[in-house]
Image (tube, helix red, strand yellow):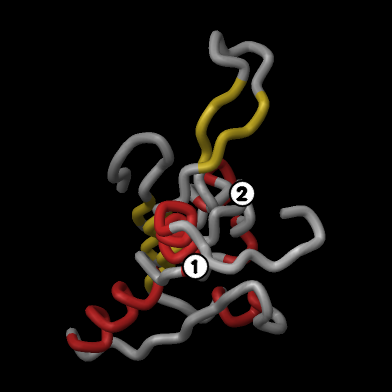
Amino acid sequence: MQGRQPLFVPCTPKGCMELLHSNIVGTPAALLLQKANATITIVHSYTKNPEEITRQADIVISAAGVANLVRGSWIKPGAVVIDVGINPVDDAESPRGYRLVGDVCYEEASKVASAITPVPGGWVR
């Protein structure tokens, strides 16, 4: 199939691609927050100045899939940070050779946020 378009796409890989392209966190979370009368701003990979926009938020929900993307300087003092990203990063000291981190740099953001979800882990105030 190299260099050619397939005549059909098998259902399993097509389903995998659909899942990867679907909005399984961001859009549903935004709609639920909007239903709860919150004002919503969605920041994505093509948003200009994501740091400035994020710094205005009272609640930050990160689902970017990029390790430590959201830095402490992006967080408004006292904001609540919910990090749903789960990203492996190399760690020679770990028995597995890697450790899991979120989209938010926990060490930086935890100094600014009033509450944060560490990855892996749970809720910390």
Residue that mark 1 sits on: 21
Q: Is residue 17 left or right of residue 92?
A: left
Query: Comparing marks 1 and 2, which lies closer to the viewer?
Result: 1
Query: Front-most of 87 and 107?
Result: 87
Compared to 101, does 54 lie above or below?
Answer: below
Compared to 66, does 107 lie above or below?
Answer: above
Q: Residue at x 64, y 76 (%)?
A: 50
Compared to 100, does 93 lie above or below?
Answer: above
Sequence-earlier tag: 1 or 2: 1
**Number of the label disc, if any, that sits on residue 77:** none
Query: Front-most of 6 and 47?
Result: 6
Q: Secondary structure at mark 1?
A: helix
Three-letter amino acid code at the position of disc 1: His
Q: Is residue 4 left or right of residue 57?
A: right
Question: How many numbered badges does the structure rendering display?
Answer: 2
Q: Is residue 2 left or right of residue 60?
A: right
**Number of the label disc, if any, that sits on residue 68:** 2
Would you identify the image quadrant in which residue 27 lies? Answer: bottom left
Q: Residue at x 41, y 52 (%)?
A: 12
Query: Front-most of 104 and 23?
Result: 23
